[in-house]
Every structure is written in C-alpha cells, then in structure tokens.
Image (cartoon, helix red, strand yellow):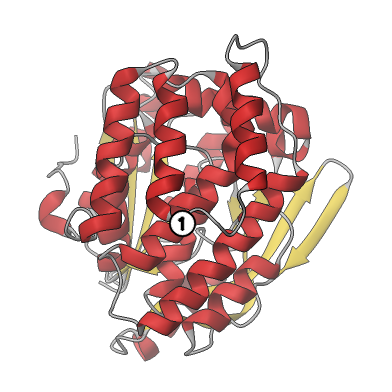
C-alpha cells in the first residue's frame, strides 16, 4: 500500500460531505482512504455509511479532541506514506495518483520524507499559488530556510509524509503537556529534519485561510487553544516566544529525527529561534481582559531585553514562573516535559506501537 489518505473529521454540512465523498472516490489497491468522524451527527453517519467501499475505511467515533481523532485515524493507516486532509479543504484529483506514482519511484529512498507540490491559498479578496523553496534539498538547513522564507499561512503539513515519520512526530506531540495553535509549524519543522521532499509538478492542495485571514479572529483561535489547555489568555502575549523556544529545544535536543551533525542542528536552532523572536518582538498581541495581562507585559519586556543572554533553562524558568501565576499544576507539567527534553532528549521516539488500535465500525 503506497499511500493512505487520512481525514479526521468533525465538521458537518454539505461541503464537508462532498469533500469526504471526493476522497473516497480515490480508493484503489495502492491508495487507501481512512475517514474517522467524531461529530456525533446522525445524518452525517448515514451519509458516511454510503461511502464505504473497497480500500475505504470508514470509522465512526464518539466526540473527542482533535489530537485523539487524528492519532486514531493515523493508527488505522496501512500506507507507507500518509496524506492528512482537512475536511473542509480541497485536493486536486489528478494529484493523488501522481503522488502515489512518485512514492513508487522514491519511497524506498530513506532520505525522502515526503512529497510536495504547488498549493492554492484561498482568501476573501483573492487566491494565490505558492510552493516552498528548497525543500527538495539534501541539506536540512536549506530545507528549513526555504520553509521559513515563505510569509503566509503554514500549509506544508498538507502533504504526503512517510508514515513512520508522522507516527514519531505525533507520538512526541501526544506526550507534550499542552497543544498550542503554532504546533503545526513545529510539526513541519520536524518533518523537514527527517528528510527531503520530492516535488510534484502540479497543483496538490487548496487551502481556505478562513478565520486565520484576519488578525483578530486568528488570535481568538490561538487563545481558544490556550484556554482549552488550561492556560490563561494572557499567555498569548508570549505566543511567538514559546513557539521559538519549543522548536529550538526540539531541534537541538529531541530524538525524533535521524542523527544530524551538531553544527547543523545548532545552525537550524539559531535560524528558527531568531525568526520567531523577531515575530515576538514585532507582534504585540491581545490578552483580552485577563487579570494577568500586566504580568505578561512585564515578562515580555524582560525577555525582549534579554535577547542573546538567556539559555534554554533560563527561558524555561521564565515560562514556568509565569504559568504558575494562574496554574501551578500547568507550570509543573510544562516545566517537567521541557526540562526532560533539554537535559536528555525527552520521551523516546514512538512509532506505530504507541498509537491506539482502532477498527472500522
């Protein structure tokens, strides 16, 4: 099985059902489609029953969080590569067999982590076409540089990726003390460290920016992630610093990618943190009406003044002390996880055996 198309779906309505039906039409002996619905909607369940066919695994589950839904659908995948689709985006029909063909050609090459192509980004005022530069390079620093040079929504994770790479990355994500909205960027960073991407000479995916198009609604979604994770909205003031810290620590210390020379890991660490720190410096973010907004502002100013002088343990202490203002439990769990990554690489990389076994229903 070359390729598994994965849809962990929660939304309802005709648009979503049409996207799922389209994906199910791609099923062949070389391409399986795995759909897991956790919406609890009876009409959608009736529709999904009509989509069942050979090489098309339809699963119905009780409501659960997005990470649980995705890890379950990933655990059911059998393909050498997996392609995660959002249930409200669009994928180009001819791209699917073309991607499977590239996987047949290059899938045995361990230096290949995934397949990429051109993306359409849809916004209210118009559309654009993008592709990431240099991610087909054999040099990890060049790949990460090409990824970071694009200014716009991150859609690189909508690509066929080697299944064992996705399993290791999401195994780490599942062990993290909290899931934040920027973790899609960290995920792509880890993918790029695992190998190069073969380029498909055609349009692959259409992404609708939606609520992320506007600064205000985008930050509301960021804060939703924080609040659901048990964090106060004031932590949004530190959003890009946390993103820079977590990504840099993982590049420098985590055990979720092939061994890279220390000099290369350090160069990527510096590149990632520098870019995220610039975002942190230039993006003054909302804290809503949090009673901890004042303390968040003080921490932000301290971090801005300390550029180049703080080591990872110092950064972690600043974050732990701030989180402890509103939750000692969250502060301790956050500190415990990231301290373990800084000092010993964190949780060992986990593969398919760490993912839940699931069956079609």
Q: Residue at x 40, y 43 (%)?
A: 316
- Determine the image quadrant of residue 134: bottom right
Determine whether, in the image, residue 80 is placed left or right of residue 46.
Answer: left
Quadrant in which the N terminus appears? bottom left
Residue 289: % across, % down: 67, 10
State the residue lying farthest toward the right: 125
Look at the image and tell me whether residue 208 can be seen.
no
Q: Name the residue carrying label 1.
A: 247
Is residue 240 depicted above or below 97 in this figure?
Answer: above
Q: Nearer the viewer, residue 326 or 189?
A: 326
Residue 216: % across, % down: 76, 27
Q: Residue at x 19, y 40 (%)?
A: 360
Looking at the picture, tell me which residue is in the foreground, 15 or 135.
135
The reply, left or right, for residue 253 in relation to residue 292 is left
Corner quadrant of residue 178 = top left
Q: Secondary structure at mark 1?
A: helix
Left or right: where 305 falls relative to 128: left
């Amino acid at each position: 099985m070359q390729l598994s198309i994965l849809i962990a779906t929660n939304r309802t309505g005709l648009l979503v059902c049409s996207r799922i039906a389209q994906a199910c039409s791609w099923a062949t002996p070389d391409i399986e489609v795995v759909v897991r619905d956790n919406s609890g909607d009876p009409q959608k369940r009736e529709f999904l029953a009509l989509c069942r066919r050979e090489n098309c695994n339809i699963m119905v589950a009780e409501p659960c969080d997005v990470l649980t839904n995705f890890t379950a659908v990933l655990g059911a995948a059998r393909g050498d590569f997996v392609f995660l689709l959002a249930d409200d985006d669009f994928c180009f029909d001819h791209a699917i067999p073309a991607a499977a063909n590239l996987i047949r050609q290059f899938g045995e090459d361990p230096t290949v982590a995934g397949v990429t192509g051109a993306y359409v980004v849809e916004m209210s005022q118009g559309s654009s076409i993008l592709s990431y530069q240099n991610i087909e390079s054999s040099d990890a620093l060049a790949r990460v540089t090409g990824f970071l040079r694009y200014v716009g929504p991150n859609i690189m994770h909508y690509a066929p990726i080697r299944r064992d790479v996705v399993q290791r990355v999401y195994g780490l994500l599942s062990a993290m003390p909290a899931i934040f909205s920027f973790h899609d960027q960290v995920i792509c960073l880890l993918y790029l460290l695992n190998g190069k991407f073969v380029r498909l000479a055609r349009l692959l995916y259409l992404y609708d920016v939606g609520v992320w198009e506007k600064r205000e609604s985008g930050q509301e979604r960021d804060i939703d992630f924080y609040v659901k994770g048990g964090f106060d909205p004031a932590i949004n003031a530190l959003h890009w610093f946390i993103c820079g810290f977590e990504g840099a620590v993982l590049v420098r210390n985590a055990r979720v990618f092939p061994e890279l020379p220390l000099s290369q890991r350090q160069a990527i660490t510096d590149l990632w943190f520098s870019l995220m720190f610039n975002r942190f410096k230039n993006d003054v973010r909302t804290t809503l009406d949090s009673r901890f907004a004042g303390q968040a502002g003080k921490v932000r100013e301290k971090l801005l003044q300390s550029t180049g002088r703080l080591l990872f343990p110092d950064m972690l202490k600043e974050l732990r002390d701030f989180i402890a203002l509103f939750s000692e439990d969250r502060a301790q769990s956050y500190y415990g996880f990231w301290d373990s990554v800084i000092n010993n690489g964190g949780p060992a990389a986990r593969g398919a055996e760490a993912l839940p076994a699931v069956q079609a229903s």
